[in-house]
Amino acid sequence: AQSVTQLGSHVSVSEGALVLLRCNYSSSVPPYLFWYVQYPNQGLQLLLKYTSAATLVKGINGFEAEFKKSETSFHLTKPSAHMSDAAEYFCAVRPDYGGATNKLIFGTGTLLAVQP
Amino acid sequence: KAGVTQTPRYLIKTRGQQVTLSCSPISGHRSVSWYQQTPGQGLQFLFEYFSETQRNKGNFPGRFSGRQFSNSRSEMNVSTLELGDSALYLCASSLAGVGDEQFFGPGTRLTVL
């Protein structure tokens, strides 16, 4: 079964520092991969998605992620953290590649704290 | 364009009761998915509807059910509530195609006492 693993349930960075949130996937076929952000008491917002086009995907709010098949990774990065980036981030995979579904399997989430 | 709306936002029920949650997708969206979010199990897929038909179902007991109406609005029902059903229930809508971006609502926070 396809799955994603997020390393680090809590990550703390200083304002202005690099943000790196890790996600590894398990898939026997090229997956659809996503990063979502969740602010307190809100739903999920899509940051970016990989759909087998370019391996470097740019998203909203200055975030980007690189798909590395050899490492089965899809890590999320942002060059300079802002206080408003403090939130929980979820990596997700759409498991039924080629099938008629939008079902997503989510990782366990990484809570990002940004210190002033 | 209005986003995905979910009602009610907060709900308190007691064990054994049943509950119905509602989701109104973005206008023009025909696919609606439901997810349960808990601290212990994280985000788990419940079911997905497209054109009033269940397109996929997660691994939840039969107490969890859903439906979609002709206007794409969706409801989910949980019967015989258990304490473990306390969670944030999220609804997401997308246009129709597989791989289309899913837009999430703010969720319904259900507390079972």
Image (spheres, rainbow, N blue to C red):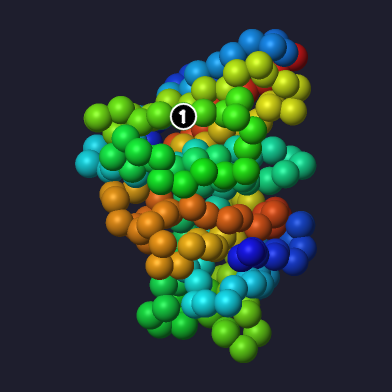
Residue furthest front as drawn: B62
Horizontal side, residue A100 vs residue B96: left or right:
right
Which quarter of the rendering shows the C terminus of chain A?
A: bottom right
**What residue appears at the point 65 percent right and 84 percent down from the top-left corner?**
A71
Q: Can you say which quadrant of the picture contains the N terminus of chain A?
A: bottom right
Q: Is residue B78 above or below residue A43?
A: above
The picture quadrant where one finds residue A89 is: bottom right
What x and y, as percent, mark residue B34?
Answer: 49, 39
| Residue at point 67%, 18% (across, down) | B81
Residue A78 falls in image quadrant: bottom right
Taking A98 as reference, is B93 above or below it? above
Residue B109 in view, yes or no: no
Across and down, in percent, residue A32 comes to 47, 68
Chain containing the residue with disc 1: B
In the rendered image, which residue does mark 1 sit on? B66
Q: Secondary structure at mark 1?
A: strand
Q: Nearer the viewer, residue B69 or B73?
A: B69
Task: Please give left or right for residue B3 compared with residue A64 in the image.
Answer: left
Q: Position of residue B101 (x, y in %)?
A: 37, 56
Report the amino acid beneath label 1: Gly
Q: Residues within 10 Å of mark 1 (few under 14, many from 20)?
A: many
Residue under the image location 61 percent in, 55 percent down? A106
